[in-house]
């Protein structure tokens, strides 16, 4: 993409592409409309077989369902920890959180239960999602 050789961890900003002022959720919605039948996500099992598939339309539909569930339980701006190995549900959770206005804090799934408070001490966390499917209690953004 860019013919550079990095010798430090700093890469200066480029201005050859315009900045898009579009949220992740809106981009998924637009892609679902413009290319809804195109394949968006494929789950491959440990044995290499195809398990499940989503088109962009299906990915948006399922993410929107989850976003409604999240929004019914969390106010916008709430930080939630996703503590799970990679899975299609992880992708759905990322899009759903974006659509619901939530902030995802990722946690290494290898962490033990007691390590979560040490891992994310600076965030006002209101939920830790460990595996899927999940159920949530109702939580305000700023508890009293």
Image (spheres, helix red, strand yellow):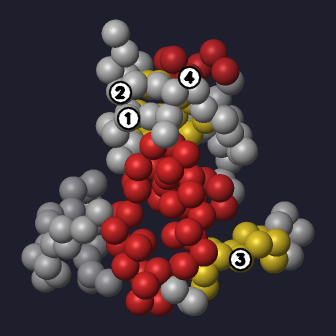
Question: Closer to the observer: label 2 or label 3?
Answer: 2
Is there a contact, CB below 8 Å, between mark 2 and mark 3? no
Q: Quadrant of residue 63?
A: bottom right
- Going from N to C along the chain, the mark reached first, 2 or 3, is 3
Point 56% across, 23% down: residue: 116
- Please name which of the two marks, 4 or 1, marks the residue nearer to the observer: 1
The answer to whether residue 106 is seen in the rendering is no
The answer to whether mark 4 and mark 2 are in CB contact below 8 A is: no
Residue under pointer 4: 116
**Disc nearer the start of the sequence (4/2):** 4
> Crowdedness of circle 4 by 10 Å Cα count: few (<14), some, many (20+)?
some
- Dot 2, how many residues are within 10 Å of its Cα: few (below 14), some (14-19), or many (20+)? some
Quick one: label 1 or label 2, which is nearer the N terminus? 1
Closer to the camera: disc 4 or disc 2? 2
**Mark 1 neighbour density, 10 Å: few (under 14) some (14–19) many (20 or more):** some
Residue extending furthest toward the left: 15
Q: Residue 113, position in %: x, y?
A: 67, 21
Q: Secondary structure at mark 1?
A: loop
Badge number at residue 53 = 3
Say which element carries label 2. Answer: loop
Contact? badges 1 and 2 (CB < 8 Å): yes
Q: Provide the residue designation for mark 2.
A: 141
The quarter of the rendered structure image containing the N terminus is: bottom left
* Circle number at residue 75: 1
Nearer-N-terminus badge (3/1): 3
Residue 88: where, in percent of width, then height?
A: 66, 61
| The C terminus sits in image quarter | top left
Q: Secondary structure at mark 4?
A: helix
Q: Between marks 4 and 2, how big is the CA–CA gap?
A: 20 Å
The reply to whether the C-beta atoms of the residues labelled 4 and 1 are less than 8 Å apart is no
């Amino acid at each position: 993409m860019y013919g550079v050789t990095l010798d430090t961890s700093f890469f200066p900003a480029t201005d050859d592409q315009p900045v898009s002022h579009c949220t992740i959720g809106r981009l998924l919605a637009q892609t679902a409309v413009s290319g809804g039948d195109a394949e968006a996500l494929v789950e491959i099992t440990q044995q290499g077989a195809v398990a499940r598939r989503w088109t962009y339309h299906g990915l948006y539909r399922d993410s929107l369902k989850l976003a409604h569930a999240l929004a019914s339980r969390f106010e916008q701006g709430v930080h939630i920890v996703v503590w799970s190995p990679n899975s299609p549900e992880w992708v759905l959770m990322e899009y759903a959180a974006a659509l619901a206005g939530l902030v995802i804090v990722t946690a290494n799934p290898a962490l033990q239960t007691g390590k979560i408070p040490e891992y994310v001490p600076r965030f006002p966390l209101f939920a830790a999602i460990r595996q899927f499917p999940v159920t949530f209690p109702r939580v305000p953004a700023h508890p009293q």
